[in-house]
Amino acid sequence: MEHPENSSEYKGLTVNGGVEQPPLMNPYLGSMRRKRRPVLSADEYVEGILKGNVTILSQAVTLVESLRPEHQEIAQQVIEKCLPYAGNSVRIGISGVPGAGKSTSIDVFGLHVLERSGGKLAVLAIDPSSERSKGSILGDKTRMEKLSVHPDVFVRPSPSAGSLGGVARKTRETIVLCEAAGFDKIFVETVGVGQSETAVHSMVDFFLLIQLAGTGDELQGIKRGIMEMADGIIINKADGNNIEKAKLAANQFRNALHLFPAPESGWTPQVLTYSGFYNIGVKEVWDMVYNYIDFVKNNGYFEYRRNEQSKYWMYETINEHLRDSFYNNPLISSMLEQKEKDVLGGLETSFVAAKNLLETYWNEIRK
Ligand code: GDP
């Protein structure tokens, strides 16, 4: 049946004349709000972070995520001052499609690693969808029931504003702050849908890919690049009737991995089955991760990978700033639409248009 909203006579959606806003019940509310969130000096943030004060850490992360230039300025100072205290952690990337069982697994994994080796855990997220939905679907406190109330765990949802590169950079900067605050285990979660894996891979020591069995053709739809990035592939929900299917899937993944060139680390990626929900095989998953960390710390790859990542982020940051500077230039942004039309209308080739815009840009910034 046609929905009544589509009828021209439907009045339910017409806008009525507005009513006047009621006066503020508490005229001091504004100043009270400001009081609750004091903007500290960079040194005060750093002091709080180094003491492991989670409230101050949280506020500092909010500054890192803020788009306001004055926040960014303090944030960058805080990050710089925290840098000498950062780095002393193991960073694990955890990726999987929605429904693969990331939050269930992370809840169990987190408790496992804390029981196994103590310390403090930060769970961060990179969520490429948050730009559109303006809200994060990952790292949500309600999704990790046990970890979100654990005294030694800091759960932070994905930063929501900006490009994937920008969101990822903020997560990387948040890692620095968490490490300075004494978090020696960092989980970075992402939805396994494409580019965000590259971003996560570029900031972690071990990349764990959660997969599911059951479709019969397990490798379908999994991008080769993502599999190549994985240091370990774990097939979740290996419980009940699903155990055999999970084992079969694991074999398929093992066979597929043989086709890839040997990874630089010298480590052969492993494929395991487990059940996050029933806590089966979780210890074996973490035996694998701990073995890997020992292995790459011994052969020097651990340091090497972190250095490569620092380099990667230097270039990423340069690229990001150059791109922003170009597209935010008023003259350029006023020309873009027309140039696009010229290219589409065949009046100019893409290359000529691009060259022309770039020349305009260079002239602008030389002024
Ligand atoms: P996410 O979207 O990747 O974070 O996935 P969730 O952790 O929210 O899990 C999706 C669904 O799979 C939920 O209904 C979970 O209860 C279920 N699930 C997660 N892990 C397991 C598991 O090990 N075994 C089974 N049978 N179900 C699981």
Image (cartoon, rainbow, N blue to C red):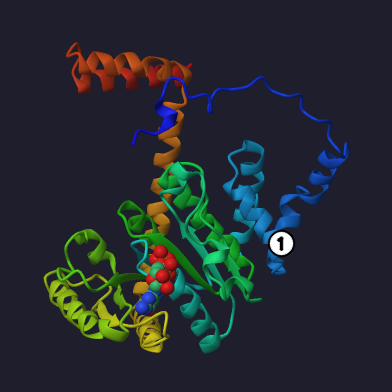
Q: Quadrant of residue 189 in the image?
A: bottom left
Which quarter of the rendered image does ligand 1 occupy? bottom left
Residue 306 seen in this snapshot: no
- Amino acid under label 1? Thr
Say few, some or many: other residues with alpha carbon within 10 Å of mark 1 (under 14 / 14 to 19 / 20 or more): few
Coordinates of residue 33 in the picture (x, y in percent): 79, 45
Residue 230 vs residue 293, the one in the foreground: 230
Q: Nearer the viewer, residue 350 or 47?
A: 350
Q: Position of residue 279 (x, y in %)?
A: 42, 85
Q: Is residue 232 visible?
A: yes
Q: Quadrant of the N terminus?
A: top left
Relative horizontal placement of residue 40, taking residue 103 as reference (left or right): right
Residue at horizontal 68%, vertical 54%?
Answer: 59
* SS category of the residue bearing label 1: helix
Residue 64 position (above or below residue 144)? above
Circle 1 residue: 55
- Tell me: residue 303, above or below residue 138: below
Instruction: Count the marks.
Output: 1
**Picture quadrant of residue 340:** top left
Is the CB–ligand 1 distance for label 1 below 8 Å? no
| Residue beneath the point at 39% across and 20% down | 361
Q: Which residue reaches farthest top?
A: 347
- Residue under the point 66% across and 38% down: 70
Q: Residue at x 55, y 74 (%)?
A: 184
Q: Which image quadrant for residue 190?
A: bottom left
Residue 311 position within the rendered picture, expressed as x and y whole percent measured from the top left? 39, 55
Please state if 165 lies on the left or on the right of 253 as rendered.
right
